[in-house]
Amino acid sequence: MTVISKDIDLAAKILQANEVIAIPTETVYGLAANIYSEDAIKKIYSLKNRPHSNPLIVHVGSINKAEELVESFPEKAKLLAQRFWPGPLTLILQKSPKVPNWITAHKQYVAIRIPHHQKTQELLQKIAFPLAAPSANPFMRISPTSANHCYNYFNEKIELILDGGACKRGIESTIISFHDSFPTILRLGSISIEEIKSEIGEITVHNNIKDEIIAPGMHNKHYSPNTNLILVDDVSPALIASLKAEKIGVLTFNKLISHQKIIKCLRLTKTLNLKEAAKNLYSFLHQLDNINTDIIIAEKVPLSGIGVTINDRLFRASQK
Ligand code: TXA
Ligand code: MG
């Protein structure tokens, strides 16, 4: 039986026994375990059905703890850490020998972040080890932004889901690598490209939709609902009428449309607010995936700030 609970002591106890639990963060829920337990880490990979070549993010409670796990902390990485931690930023830095190879898929670089969620911060203070935590979804599926989403994926398979409510950001952390001390955005995330630039100046964005895939988990097909999803510039009743499908789910940025074929239409924001749209994105995709439709039609959002990240996720969700 999987328990959904707010009990931090219980969560710490299960982690100390080298078991896997789900934890809340401000971005999405994670499947967490002690980085020093090879057995526990193997369980994460098998629960997620994730290839072993795909490394895990290490979650720590303070910048000091992060520094202990790396060989060097380049100046620009420090600026970013000071500005955005705790928060939805992951830094990939040269690892110290302390970090086990089973976390990094034998790479010499480790991904680290300090999550901004009170429950998980308290949990990290109670335990003596960092937590590896990939998003708590099976490989390729939509990330979870509530305890219930985790329950639907892993009921009976994990002992505990630490309940921290709905995730405030709703989209994964922005990942910046510092290979040879040179910063590159490897995954668009909850912190926009503009926010990063305002801290450290120009930065390369490795757009791995077109470029070679260098973050191993950044496949084009990712974040996918079971239902077929089509991404369009503009959803209109005329477009809906032209489709063969009879039962349609619709996800828009701001407008509501109706048509006899639309089973459900959800709008990401009522106030044209991109942050609200990001917070709702996965939760609404879960909702639309769980009703019985032939197809989901999603509409692109405005291409500024976090809107760039939302469109990136919608694009991946639309890949077959
Ligand atoms: O917001 C987040 O980052 C969430 C929460 C739970 O913290 N975590 C998350 O983890 O999104 P995951 O495993 O679903 O995605 C992490 C991505 C993967 O694409 C992985 O390949 C990449 O980060 N990654 C992790 N360690 C890496 C490394 N050492 N080098 C290159 N890429 C790495
Ligand atoms: Mg993930």
Image (cartoon, rainbow, N blue to C red):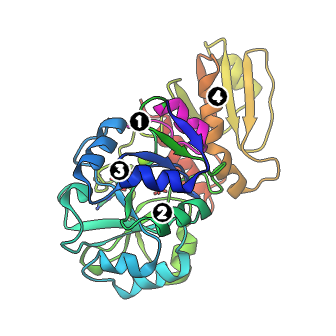
CA gap between label 1 and label 3 equals: 23 Å
> Which residue is more in the foreground, 180 or 299?
180
**Tag 3: amino acid:** Ala
CA gap between label 3 and label 2 equals: 31 Å
Q: Which residue is mark 4?
A: 288
Decide if residue 232 is in sight here.
no
Q: Quadrant of residue 131?
A: bottom left
Q: Which residue is mark 2?
A: 174
Q: Residues within 10 Å of mark 4 (few under 14, many from 20)?
A: many
Please name which of the two marks, 1 or 3, marks the residue nearer to the observer. Answer: 3
Magenta range is: 139-154
CA gap between label 2 and label 4 equals: 26 Å
Q: Which residue is drawn at the image coordinates 63% and 44% (left, top)?
A: 281
> Which residue is more in the foreground, 177 or 212?
177
Q: Which residue is mark 3?
A: 17
Label 2, secondary structure: give it.
strand
